[in-house]
Amino acid sequence: MSRKITFLTLFLWLMTVTFPVIAQQKTDTTYTFRFVPQKDMFYVPWNGNDTELARLLECIENSKATIFDGKLPLLVDGYCNSLGGEAENLATAKIRANRVKSELITRAKIKEENFITHNHATGGDFVIVRLTVPAKETAAMDAEARRKAETERLEAEKRAEQERLAEEQRKAEEARLAAEKAEVEKAAQQNTLANTPSETKITTDYHLSLRANLLRWAILTPNLGVEWRICPSWGIAVNGSWTSWSWKDKDRRYALWEVAPEIRYYMGEKKAWYLGAMFKAGQFNYKISETGKQGDLMGGGITAGYQLRLNKALTLDFNLGLGYLNADFEKYEVIDGVRVRCGNETKNWCGPINAGVTLVWKLF
């Protein structure tokens, strides 16, 4: 009994001392690539194959020198048992192993002589790749991999920070250029408006103007008016005329007064054209021949016109009015300096009732 106890104690001590040494000698690193049953295509993203391939490529990269020297072969085992016969399974297992090797040859530049291949008609539908790496080397590779990963992380953070700073600088430069461009365009627009001919500028910069119809002044009928521009599209104008002339010892006479309010609607992009509605009322006394006429007139109609800007203060207004006028008057003759009534008469007129070339002076 004492011998058995002594032998068991010695055996346990040997296992305690020997197993760590053996464990430190070599470490098997295994990678499994799965295939669709009865198929030989190697689908990398399928069923975790992409993760296994990434791990295997990293391991190969860390041990590439040893692998190329032939000291560390890649053990490739192809398996297939989903077909009908052993020959078919072995053939498919071989193709599967070759597809995995081709992927490694393409990606990691491994050569055919760096592989040891075995094919099996049992087990399942997969390919196993094993590397027998010494434990110390594995630890060194792990440390190197961690160091490399940390270095790559720091470099990635540095690149990200540089890209962020570059993006902020680019946006700031774009904002600066946009502000400069907007300032230049604003200055150019102001300069263009300042140098544009008056008729091309929209009349939005005044509210009240003084008016004088030059045609009325030309026929010795002084005319004045005002216009209130409510907004760029609407305006209200009131024009008035008055004259009183006599000659040949008052045997000849030309006297008139009238008031014509008008509302206008300005059209177009430049607000230069307009349409309006006008009302006219007044009195007259004409004696150009032997018979004189004295009475009242009243009417109204539609006006239309165009305003030509001369400068910031002056505008020429060309207008024409069409409509209806009614004149109710008395006829008279002058005998020995005395007016003698000859009768009454009423006339109606349809057609032009107003025309003008009006000088407009902006007050404010």
Image (cartoon, helix red, strand yellow):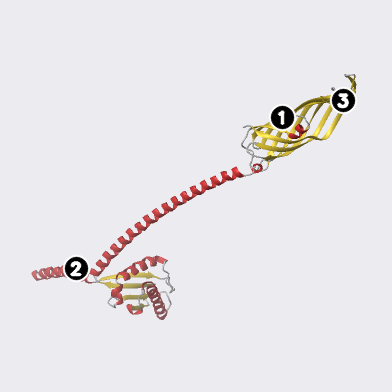
Numbered disc total? 3
Residue 11: give its label.
Answer: none
List x then y, in percent, for residue 178. Answer: 49, 49
Query: Is residue 134 placed above or below 282 in the rendered structure?
Result: below
Q: Give amino acid for label 2.
A: Pro
Could you tell which of marks 1 and 2 lies nearer the N-terminus? 2
Rounded to the nearest whole Å, what is the CA distance between mark 3 and mark 1?
27 Å
Structural crowding at the residue carrying mark 2, measured as other residues with C-alpha within 10 Å and reported as few (<14), some (14–19) or many (≥20): few
List x then y, in percent, for residue 230. Answer: 65, 33
Place residue 28 in its image quadrant. bottom left
Residue bearing mark 3: 292
Label 1 element class: strand
Residue 224: give its label.
Answer: 1
Could you tell which of marks 2 and 3 lies nearer the N-terminus? 2
Residue bearing mark 2: 20
Q: Give amino acid for label 3.
A: Gly
Q: Give amino acid for label 1.
A: Leu
Label 3 element class: strand
